[in-house]
Image (cartoon, coloured by chain):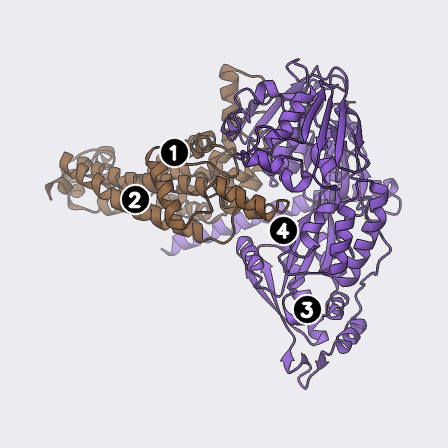
Chain colours: A purple, B brown
Amino acid sequence: MKKRFSIIMCLLLSLTLVLSACGGSKEGSGDTSSAGQTSEQSSGSGEGELVADGLLKATDQTKSPEAANNRKDMVIIGFAAPSGIFNPAYAETAYDIYVSETLFDTMLQVNKDGTYSEGLAESYSISDDKLVYTFKLKDGLKFSDGSALTAEDVAFSITMLHDKSYDGPTDIIKDAHIKGGQEYKDGKASTVEGVKVIDPRTIEVTTTEPGALAFSAIGTTGVLSKAYYGKDYKQGDLGYMKDLFTKPLGSGSYKLEKFAAGQEAVLTANENYYKGKPKIPNLIFKFTTNETNVQLLQTGETDMDFITVSKDQVDQLKEMGFLDVNLFPTNGYGYIAFNHNRDQFKDKRVRQALTYGLDRQQIVDAVYQGYADVIDIPQSKESWSYTDEVTKYNFDLEKAKQLLDEAGWTVGADGMREKDGKKFKIIFTATTPNEVNDAIIPIAQANYKELGIEFIAEQMDFNAAIEKRKKGDFDMMFLAWGLTPDPQSSENVFKTGGSQNDTGYSNAKLDELFTKAGKEVDIEKRKPIFKEIYQELNEDLPYIYLYQRRDMWATNARIQGFDMSPYRRFTNDLSQIEIK
Amino acid sequence: MKQYAIRRLLQMIPTIIGVSVLLFIVFAMAPGNFIDSNPTISKERAAELKAIHGLDKPLVERYFTWAENTIKGDLGLSLQHKQPVTTVLNRYMWNSFLIAAIVLVLSWTIAILVGVFSAVRQHSIYDGLITFLVFALMSLPSFFVGLYAIKLFAIDLKWTPVGGMYTSGSNATGLARIWDLVEHLMLPIIVLTSISVGGLTRYFRTSMLDVVRQDFIRTARAKGLKERTVIFKHALRNALLPAITLLGIELPGLFSGAMITEKIFNWPGIGRINLDAINARDYFLLMGFTMFLALLTMLGNLLADLLYRVADPRVRMK
């Protein structure tokens, strides 16, 4: 027995030795290589300070792995697995949308700043009463099977969104208000009255009220072939569409050859593409996971992937040397919502005090290590509607205390603030696991304690937290919103009774401004209105605006020609990219 | 025997109904739902969508509609995938099955060999070494072993691919394609086998030790049989009896997928589809998949009991 014990001890000891030796050598080699890299980087990017935006060019393209270099006529782009819904009317996850956008084209294409310009359409016009939209298609448009793409196909694509059995994510009635749309849905009409084919290249869409979102909603409807998708169509029954998801036929830059669920989608260039046949004949979308997408780039199994931004990841990608790293602001923002039905949050000064009194920079830096900005309005700085002429709520405890005093929340005997005999206490509903909440909770607790406010965190599963929010059973809560290219859709969030306004927020001035902006279709006229909207949102603070983080695409530098923005996805460039 | 099997099968019916009611209630009561998680649609549109999918009806009615369709073989439509649940399961389940089946065969073979070996030489240095290794493997978390294996074998040594099922962009057919699959299977199988072999080895070792000490083994040795015959013919057969139960329990495991390893090795299996379905509250997919596993669990138990009767005359006697 004793002998056995000593043998095991010996084994254990020798094993620890082996392990520690491994660790030592690894650290050593890691150190030297990173030291070499730092000097290179500092010469490359000026002072060696953090570059959190824009394109970081590859430093040494010769490091590109052989596996990637051997693919002379093929590009492999990695992203998370789609569900296999390759139809622009039904695609819901970002990944299904990537594939759908590659396979299908639309009349309008989105620009880098979130505005739109002609895609399949040659020109468009909007009537003076802002009710009638006329699109003229380019000449000689074809689907990938060679059949002609006409206004009939566009009309079918818009009509089917109004079908009673349509269960995709588009809400065309809310966005476009096309005349006769509801009647068609209710089965009272056999066509959508407002959708009219003038000639094979011209389509006219009539709406019932001027709407800022109508233009993009109509113009970015993915064009489906009526001959292919419409041949079995009977009003009220779109069930067959689901059988065609993985057998798509569109007019996009590539066509689908093969879809292996959870593995890859194999595409080939569409020779009938209206901008000319794409330069790279073969394209593969490989479905990757966060765990290994960096490794796949490293071994050359993929040429490009969407990588979660963190300092470690960015450093690792830069260190590889052969990757162009494109960082841009995420199209969305994080915020802490107030429950406006609770008395303590009804006073604007209290909300301002809670914003001044929270060290947002510290929270954001703790989570994103420089790869996120603290924001003061709920809009991306890349949007055409963005404005910088607003109050900056930089961390200022004195100002916060002063505002609370003004609002009547005085410091009681125990150092805590109270008003009308009620203590100021905040129940913070936090989703978990969530790294932002992990940073907010300790910082807010410390900051608000100095203001004399008790901050209590309640952690729960995401769906449970959302349910609480819907019921209005919370004080404050951190969440994030995604943004659409058009800022009008934020009215769902901030207008009184808006479909996503479940914080009970109501501001008559904002309601009026949103309504006004919603009736304009000219961007130049909408800009000043949105400036006013954001100034009001900045002043009135329905939320504590927290941060806008970064998205990142890393691309092997052998592929050139991407011109992305938060609005303009990589799919728009697929016909233009080249292998160098 | 036949009568016993039929009786057991009939007993399964109330159990499965009970399980389905319980699952349905649990999933329905979980906060949040798929449709309300879309922030861009209006309340009217959300109501329309709920009506299309029958989510606006009272819970009891929804259960009976679901049960009726399920009996007819229609498990409903996955909300996330917009495809029949059976199609979705069919797409991913066989990939998981492939790995699980290979791992099952490998880990059982290794565990039996190693278990017997260390039991026969109980208290020897080999026994100590194996016990140590087995415990070490058992206690390592799969995500760590998986990621480290990728770093070591795929990136540094370049012996195996990083993940996935086939090499993207390869047009290999026939044997070359099968070899491609084998290369991709290597890492996940090694990791999963080494994790599951630990417990099994302990199990077989204990079971073998029990048997080896019994009188009939002493008798066998006393009448001069070769040690090999004693161990493999007389002892092992008896030591394997309890393993039948274990095999029955493993049946649903063949189809349930491995959430963590599938994500790490980017394997297109059902485990992570199930995880996504839970997060997205994809009711029909969840119900379909969980019920399928529940059914397999019951079948596995039944099968184990029946096999036990075949293998062990003592059970048959009762």
Secondary structure beneath dot 4 equals loop
Q: Is the same chain shared between marks 1 and 2?
A: yes
Q: Which residue is mark 1?
A: B74
Check the residue under mark 3 and report the chain it is in. Answer: A
CB contact under 8 Å: marks 2 and 4: no
Query: Disc 1 and disc 4: Cα gap in Å?
Result: 34 Å
Quadrant location of the C terminus of chain A in the rendered image: top right
Looking at the picture, how far across and down is residue B26, in whole percent? 41, 52
With A249 as the anchor, is A368 left or right in this view? right
Mark 2 residue type? Ile
Could you tell me which residue is drawn at 44 percent across and 41 percent down?
B284
State the residue position of label 2: B16
Amino acid type, residue under disc 4 in the picture: Ser
Looking at the image, tell me whether mark 1 or mark 2 is earlier in sequence order: 2
Residue type marked 3: Phe
Q: Nearer the viewer, mark 3 or mark 2?
A: 3
> Do labels 3 and 2 touch, CB within 8 Å?
no
Which of the chains bears the disc numbered 2? Answer: B
| The quarter of the displayed image where residue A169 is located | top right
Residue sitting at the far bottom: A413
- Residue A560: in sight, yes or no? yes
Q: CA distance from mark 4 to mark 3?
A: 21 Å
Label 1 residue SS: loop
Are the residues flagged by discs 3 and 2 from a single subunit? no
User: Which residue has dot 3 on it?
Assistant: A345
Q: Nearer the viewer, mark 2 or mark 4?
A: 4
Q: Is residue A301 left or right of residue B164?
A: right
The foreground one among B192 and A94 is A94
